[in-house]
Image (cartoon, rainbow, N blue to C red):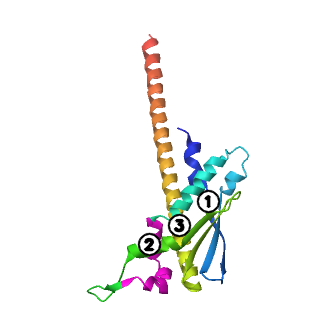
């Protein structure tokens, strides 16, 4: 098993590098994130480095993940999103308990159309921004999408690390069983040949 190939994505870290906004219409906020190896790997000269192609694939995957239905739907569940004027525009009525009902599918489609995700060529940086109808909504939507994306990446990393851990435990158990069988075979051979 080539663990190197399976470890590249889970061992990369996505860090929120900064947030800025510009006041020119359309209103937007920008989050810049940096993808990097954990420091213990980056400082180890013996640790294999991802190839340029592997980095490009990782960036492409992350950029698609930001725009995924899961990330956008989860971003819509956040209070910071639900408190925007933008989200209020998707209210379609109230339920039997008097709670507002929103057209989540239309909101996801609109949010995706406002979402801009760019890899800054030649760097480990990519930007996320949402063009909003006003500055406050833009900032909140950008932060909600960014936060949800980071939570998604962390969950993915944890799942992949758990999968790798299970593979290694299974391999360890297999080797221990082989060692026990070998020891038993040697003991049997010694007993049979001592006479």
Task: Name the residue: 43% across, 76% down.
Answer: 107
Q: Which residues are magenta?
A: 69-91
Mark 3 element type: helix
Assign the magenta stretch its main secondary structure.
Answer: helix
* Quadrant in which residue 99 is drawn: bottom left
Residue, disc 2: 108
In-front residue for pair 166/61: 61
Indicate the position of residue 103 as horizontal and vertical percent values: 37, 78
User: Where does the C terminus fall, quadrant-wise?
Assistant: top left
Judge whether 172 appears above or below 135 on screen.
above
Could one spot residue 151 in this view of the protein? yes
Distance in Å between CA atoms under marks 1 and 2? 27 Å
Q: Which mark is residue 13?
A: 1
Mark 1 element type: strand
In-front residue for pair 65/153: 65
Q: Nearer the viewer, mark 1 or mark 2?
A: 2
Side (left or right) of 143 relative to 51: left
Indicate the position of residue 185 as horizontal and vertical percent values: 44, 22
Q: Residues within 10 Å of mark 2 (few under 14, many from 20)?
A: many
Q: Earlier in the sequence, mark 1 or mark 2?
A: 1
Q: Are marks 3 and 2 in contact (CB under 8 Å)?
A: no
Q: Nearer the viewer, mark 3 or mark 2?
A: 2
Query: Seen from this angle, which residue lies furthest bottom?
Result: 98
Indicate the position of residue 33 as horizontal and vertical percent values: 64, 66
Q: Residues within 10 Å of mark 3 (few under 14, many from 20)?
A: many
Q: Which mark is residue 149?
A: 3
Judge whether 185 appears above or below 14 on screen.
above
163 drawn magenta: no
């Amino acid at each position: 098993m080539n663990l190197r190939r399976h470890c590249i994505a889970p061992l990369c870290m996505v860090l929120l590098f900064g947030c800025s906004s510009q006041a020119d219409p359309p209103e937007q906020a920008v989050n810049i994130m940096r993808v990097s190896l954990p420091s213990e790997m980056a400082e180890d000269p013996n640790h294999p480095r991802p190839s340029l192609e592997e980095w490009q694939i990782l960036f492409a995957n992350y950029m698609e993940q930001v725009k995924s239905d899961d990330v956008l739907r989860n971003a819509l569940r956040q209070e910071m999103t639900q408190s925007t004027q933008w989200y209020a525009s998707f209210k379609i009525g109230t339920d039997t308990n008097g709670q507002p009902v929103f057209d989540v599918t239309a909101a996801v489609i609109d949010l995706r159309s406002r979402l801009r995700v760019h890899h800054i060529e030649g760097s480990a940086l990519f930007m996320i921004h949402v063009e909003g109808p006003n500055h406050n909504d833009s900032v909140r939507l950008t932060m909600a999408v960014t936060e949800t994306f980071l939570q998604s990446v962390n969950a993915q990393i944890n799942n992949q690390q758990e999968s790798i851990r299970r593979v290694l435990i299974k391999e360890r158990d297999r080797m221990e069983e082989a060692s026990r069988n070998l020891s038993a075979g040697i003991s049997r051979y010694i007993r049979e040949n001592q006479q």
